[in-house]
Image (tube, rainbow, N blue to C red):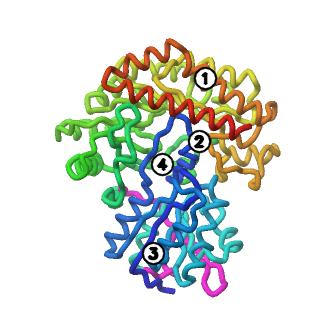
Amino acid sequence: MRLPVKKVMCIYPPTGMFNREDRCQDRAGDIVTVVSRPPMPLLYEAAIVKKAGKEIIIKDYSAHEGAWYLLKEDIASYRPDMLVFNVTTPSFKEDIKTAACVKEVDRNIIVVGRGAYFNMFHREVLEKYSDVDVLIRGEWEETFDELVRVGDLSIVKGISYRLQGELFVNPERPVISNLDIIPFPDRSVFDNRLSFRPDTRQPEATIIAARGCPYQCIYCLASVVNGGCVRMRSPKNIVDELQECVQRFGIKTFLFRSDLFTFKQKWVYEICDEIIARNLKIGWACNTRVDTIDAQKARRMKQAGCWAVAMGVESGNEESLRKMKKGITLKQAEEAVRVCRKSGLKVFSYFLIGFPWETHRHIQDTINFAIKLDADLAQFSPIYPYPGTPLYDLAASLGLITPEKLHPYALVKAAMGTQFLSMDEVERYLGLAWKRFHLRPGYILRTLHHAGPANVLNYLRFGCRALFKLQKLQKVRA
């Protein structure tokens, strides 16, 4: 079957504000310390379709939860040949309504689903939902390009589809070894002012720098969706995108997204050197593991404009770290924070609460250790057992979770209790952790002092918004 594709519509469904980047599948609108990010899959989809010489419109209905009539109106107006909807595991039960919504307007539109959820459940979805035509599995950019450009379903690797009532599952597509072949995201289709750095409120662009993670953390989707081999864009290709953002869109603040940015020292140094050589006066943040950052690397990053690093510490209990297969120690976390601070980098620390084996002691250790680390910001989240991860299998085997009970509040509301704590107890600890860390008088004064006169209002605004979110979440949990 060949798809007659001339006009494409790519959307985020009106089902709430979720990060839909496969590894990151959380309810972004409710996470206390997270601000809005650009819809990167939509921007990449726009670039791929335009490169193929076809028409495209993108629509992010995230802020219009439940407003399906808006989607129908836009479909009726634009009349696409193909509509692509992006899903997450937490929001899938609502996202899937997109297919029926599209067919109500025009049954001839080809409905395509994209998202990590389909890596596992593509057969089940096609069997249950007759309005879905094609599902993309695995790494999606090359697959999507072939769907749009070639359109012959029988030869496109990495898809599952239905044709005349029969289900077809095409061979897997290998991961993209050379990430430089992926076109830059099309930022011309997005209001870049909607994504900003929280302390200065300057427009902030997301740069996808690398994919893949060799570590085996039981809760993480990184190796599930991107594989265990670390694949990195070339430093030149990355800095070319940075330069385009600066010169074309006036963006000077960036967030590097990768499964492991600081994995290879030579690569990090080459990116820093390229930024410096081009005299790009930019600021940027990235993620790191606590065992892949050192003083020399931190200093070089700082010289190239890095202002903050985010590190997943996850727990303040060594037993929990071992059981989750994190592969780090508390001592390494302390050293990582120390060297980053000494180099002038802000540190954002991330912690997870509610692993199946955790008791009161484990969680109290985590809260106490977070306070001891005293990072510039701390995010405490309940674990979410994403299908495909070892954590999901463990939780299911212990009877703590079933697919039917997975709610949409990923990393916001407890999805399960532990073997020793109820869901209510896990959620009470989440509120306690946030308050004990962020409402310390010394922490507040230090944060406002470091903000400086120019940004103190932004910090106060961010803090008030975070308090509002926390109160809102407590009502949701109740």
- 157 magenta-colored: yes
The region drawn magenta spans 151-179
Secondary structure under tag 4 reads: loop
Query: Circle 2 sits on which residue?
Result: 216
Residue type pointed to by label 2: Gln
Question: Percent x, y for residue 251?
Answer: 28, 45
Q: Report if the CB atoms under discs 4 and 3 are less than 8 Å apart.
A: no
Q: Nearer the viewer, mark 1 or mark 4?
A: 1
Secondary structure under tag 2 reads: loop
Q: Tell me the tag on residue 435.
A: 1
Secondary structure under tag 3 reads: helix
Q: Report if the CB atoms under discs 1 and 4 are less than 8 Å apart.
A: no
Give the class, few, some or many, for how many residues have Cα within 10 Å of label 2's Cα (few <14, many ≥20). Answer: some
Residue type pointed to by label 1: Lys
In three-dimensional space, the C-alpha distance between marks 3 and 2, rounded to whole angstroms, equals 33 Å
Query: Circle 3 sits on which residue?
Result: 147
Looking at the image, which residue is at 66% across and 83% down?
166
Q: Is residue 300 left or right of residue 468?
A: left
Residue type pointed to by label 3: Leu
In three-dimensional space, the C-alpha distance between marks 1 and 4, rounded to whole angstroms, equals 34 Å
Q: Nearer the viewer, mark 4 or mark 3?
A: 3
As drawn, 205 above or below 124: above
Secondary structure under tag 1 reads: helix
Looking at the image, which residue is at 65% across and 79% down?
167
Residue type pointed to by label 4: Gly
Question: Which of the two labelled residues, at mark 1 and mark 2, occupies the earlier sequence position?
Answer: 2
In three-dimensional space, the C-alpha distance between marks 3 and 1, rounded to whole angstroms, equals 49 Å
Question: Which of the two labelled residues, at mark 1 and mark 4, occupies the earlier sequence position?
Answer: 4
